[in-house]
Image (tube, rainbow, N blue to C red):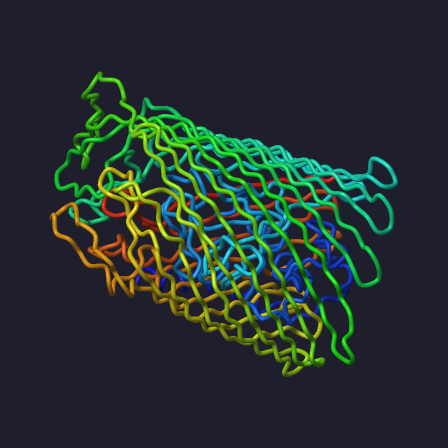
Amino acid sequence: MQKRFYQLLLTIHICLPAILLSAGQKSSDPTKLSSILVTSDLEEDGSKNYYKTNASSVTRTDTPLFETSQSVQIVTQNTLSDLNVVKLDDTLDYVSGISRQNNFGGVWDNFAIRGFAGHENSGISLLRNGFADNRGYNAPRDAASIESIEFLKGPSGSLYGNTEPGGTINVVTKKPKFISENNLEFKIGSNDFYRVATDFTGSLSDSIAYRLNLAAEKKKSSRNYIQSERYVIAPALLWNINDTTQISYNGEYIRQDAPLERGIVAINEDVDVIDHKLFFGNPDDGDVTLENYTHQLKLEQKLSENWSSKIGLAYKTGTLQGIASEVKPFVNVTTDSVKLRTRYRDYDSEDFTFQVDVKNTSDIGSLQNTLLLGVESYRYKIDSVLYNLNNSIQIDNLYTTPTYTKLSNEHLSLSTNKHEEQKAIALFAQDELSLSDSLKILVGLRYDDIEMNIIDYKNNTSASQNNYALSPRAGITYIITPSLAWYATSGSSFRPNSGVDINGNSFDPEEGISFETGLKFESEDKNIGATISLYKIDKKNVLTASDPDGKYSIAAGEVGSTGLEFDINGKINENIKISANYAYTKTEVTKDTGGIKDWATGEVVNLEGKALSNIPKHSGGLFLMWENYLSNNSAYGIGSNILYTGERKANYINSFTLDSYITVGLNSYWQATEDLKFSFNISNLFDEEYIASSYDRSWLTPGSTRSYTLSMAYKF
């Protein structure tokens, strides 16, 4: 604790002079500062800020966030730039209530919102431009084509169906512009990090514009034997057919090659015994490859003064293929030797979605009314083939110089060969009614009909089920003053559980309900906004664990989450920008139908009263950036971030705990000219050693060590 106190003291010492200087010194020409700054990373609304007033996905009707009865946080393009973000995972600490789950060494995104993590492998439901984007296995989302990231807190089931009650995330991609803008960016950093990215946009004609984002990245890790490569191609087109009709296309190809590794082990539940660099896999296995192709097509039309419509199609495919060795889950390692199993995975998924919605805005007497009606249908299928060989590799001398020995020359045997398919159709309606300038009401309802079929070719069995769900939502917003609003909302969530239990039976769907209230602040000039919220969420039919062979899931029964969250983002004055958050999150299993076996002791542990794993009670972050201009008509910015994650339970049975940790980062840039920008960032400045997430005793993910990144961006 004393070490952390001195770390915080040093960080404040670094940042305080700049903050005090900006508070006491007015720019002699503030317009010159703005003219320099807005040339880089310009947002669509024309502001260079950490705060946005609108989010496209909250109501699907562009209602201002200040008037919406929901907590919504947006990571803007400017925030992404100042933090030097390259993937979605880099943004999680800057929004309240987000906690990391085991992502298998960064192979894919996996995290929880307000305590709810969704499927233990593929994670929560994610959206991309309003389309579901997280069914199946997906490479980590890359920032090359991201315009902003919208964190929608609470259930969004009335609009999007398959979502967690804690919230969902909508990734908004960059749109084509009719003004020519070309950007080339190079990054280098520690651990042999190299990245090049391009962003080209402009017009092909008076009515057609394009955008093309490309990225290629190669890096090693502070951990032994780990290195990865990533490639992104993201084209986009916009065709303004006439003044009332436009068609847009958004595509992305992303490929990642990296070892699939589970992290380190806890020796007798002690996470400090093993060197965090130690690789618990087979160095000869090679990479696991994830590939995703995404295509989205939208037709938007203004039918009349009051009516408009959108028609959308999305098609996505994904593959995961490769071999990897790992410690078996739930193993309690007690000596300086451990045996691994080797697995070959070949997963192939296909996802097709169709959406139609119609919006009407009209006046009913003195009342303003916005009505949204929609239909959505999707078909998702995945083929999963898994080969397994137990006790294939042995690692000795865990405490000193590890040695890797091959134990068996046997071939891997078929463990899983199944086909899963989901078909769904949904109808939804939403009505926003302005009873006055101060009082807003929102009600919504969605009906989902989902059919699931699973064929197990290995065991020659099949299972099917139909799920029907109504997902209502109601909210109220009262605008107390032009800068302060109170809101309250309640809604339900619905999500089908994939897979089968150990008896071959499919699971009942997850169902959740949430109650929330809060206050919103928005400054008169709309440069800064804040939200404080209180919530209570209950959910049943939650899958919390797997059997010792990792084949079958187990339902815990019912879980709950209550919490308090605070977020503030924006510009304090001409020189200072801020992004800060705090979350108190209390989770527990409120009902356990059968308990779970502790495979270290053989005892069955009842989960009732246990906290959900990897969810800290307390977490928060602070990011300050101070900017000014120089006499040679250039500009600069310097800032720091302090991130805190509290203690977390490390497994389902709460048998051991992950320590809290604080990391500190430095962020800076120099806008040398309108076209040339340099950035330098340091993360984990004091090289804090910590565990970011875990999956019981045998799979713990070490946090990133101290690293730096130097970037150069050139516009032409």
Seen in the picture, residue 510 relative to 136 is either above or below; the reply is below
Residue 1 visible in the current orientation: no
- Relative to 529, 401 lies left or right: left
Nearer to me, 331 or 662: 331
| Quadrant in which the C terminus appears | top right
**Residue 115 appears at what percent x and percent y?**
39, 60
Nearer to me, 196 or 189: 196
Q: Residue at x 24, y 41 (%)?
A: 329
**Residue 162 appears at what percent x and percent y?**
49, 52
Q: Residue at x 66, y 64 (%)?
A: 53
**Residue 666 appears at what percent x and percent y?**
50, 53
| Quadrant in which the N terminus appears | bottom left
Q: Quadrant of residue 299?
A: top right
Q: Quadrant of residue 201?
A: top right
Give the total number of marks visible in the rendering: 0
- Relative to 393, 77 lies left or right: right
Taking the view exactly as shown, the residue that stands out farthest to the top is 409
**Residue 669 appears at what percent x and percent y?**
61, 50
Q: Residue at x 77, y 57 (%)?
A: 308
Q: Quadrant of residue 552?
A: top left
Residue 225 visible in the current orientation: yes
Q: Residue at x 18, y 21 (%)?
A: 407
